[in-house]
Amino acid sequence: MLYPELFKSLESVRWHMDKDIPWDSFDPSLLTDDQAKTIRMNAITEWSALPATEMFLRDNRHDSDFSAFMSIWFFEEQKHSLVLMEYLRRFRPDLVPTEEELHAVRFEFDPAPPLETLMLHFCGEIRLNHWYRRAAEWHTEPVIKHIYRTLSQDEARHGGAYLRYMKKYLAQFGDSARAAFAKIGVLMASARRTEKPLHPTNLHVNKALFPNDTVQSRLPDPDWLEHWLDEQIRFDEVWEKKVIERILHNMSLLFERTFDTVQELNRYRKELNASLVAAGQQPA
């Protein structure tokens, strides 16, 4: 069981809202209206950890270890939303999200295979870690710069915890788990080929609600994410390459096989699927 160890390690580095955020360093002259509005959108987006947790608990009823870990992940992700709202409450109270705006991103996600979902969120943590690092560089006001750096470190730790569970499932499920992880790895490392940012909050998750079934589509400004990435924090090809390299690096560690390109990972995925078919199993 990984939960006790993960609880101890994450507890030891957990930051405190009052003690570890330098609120007294706020400089109003260094916060623009556009910057403040993006903080509002990120606060609402982070609130979607609530329906994601409900999804994880529903689809992992068979796994009490991972479900217990959700208590840590949910607490820390929900605190991300809270600290961004606290920043707005203190310095831009006119932009604090309403309860109705927060509740709008709480909707049911369709059931999905747990292993694929885990890998999807693992890649999402890597991507968000890089988005927040870039956001910290783009912002000019010192308190929000510190907050985004803090959140990016949390996302990296969450990705590390997910990776621990992925290793556990490789030992339990063998090639079927490898195929599931490789399939999503290829998808999430191919973001440069897609029109929209590949992140769990930007993917369709409820057929009955389509097209209003992504977290981003339910925000007050559904188009803000692309503008934030392309025009504001300028998450360009250099930064996208960092994400892809990080995904491939972790896949190399996970599978104990070097992947320098998405194409190499895709070839490995096809090998796994062929092996599963030969063994009479359903490929991912």
Image (cartoon, rainbow, N blue to C red):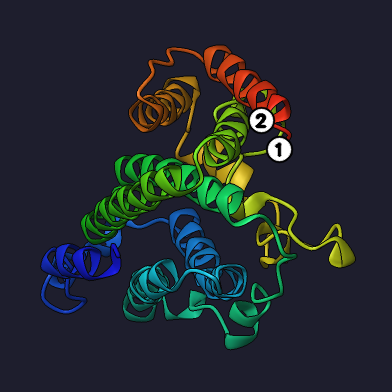
51 and 164: which is toward the camera: 164
Tell me the quadrant of the picture where the N terminus can be found: bottom left
Residue 171 falls in image quadrant: top left
> Residue 276 shows which numbered tag?
2
Residue 269 image position (x, y, % from top left): 60, 24
Dot 1 alpha-carbon crowd within 10 angstroms: few under 14, some 14 to 19, many 20 or more: few
**SS category of the residue bearing label 1:** loop
Q: Residue furthest front?
A: 279
Q: Is residue 120 visible?
A: yes
66 and 223: which is toward the camera: 66
Residue 201 image position (x, y, % from top left): 61, 55
Q: Is residue 74 visible?
A: no
Q: Residue at x 85, y 57 (%)?
A: 211
Tell me the quadrant of the picture where the C terminus can be found: top right
Residue 170 image position (x, y, % from top left): 44, 42
146 and 284: which is toward the camera: 284
Q: Amino acid at mark 2?
A: Leu
Q: Residue at x 59, y 53 (%)?
A: 117
User: Is 202 drawn above or below residue 13 in the view shown?
Assistant: above
Q: Which residue is mark 1?
A: 281
Dot 2 alpha-carbon crowd within 10 angstroms: few under 14, some 14 to 19, many 20 or more: some
The count of marks equals 2
**SS category of the residue bearing label 2:** helix
Q: Residue at x 45, y 49 (%)?
A: 172
Q: Amino acid at mark 1?
A: Gln
Query: Cβ–Cβ below 8 Å for labels 1 and 2?
Result: yes
Distance from Cα at disc 1 to Cα at disc 2: 5 Å
User: Is 196 drawn above or below residue 78 in the view shown?
Assistant: above
Q: Earlier in the sequence, mark 1 or mark 2?
A: 2
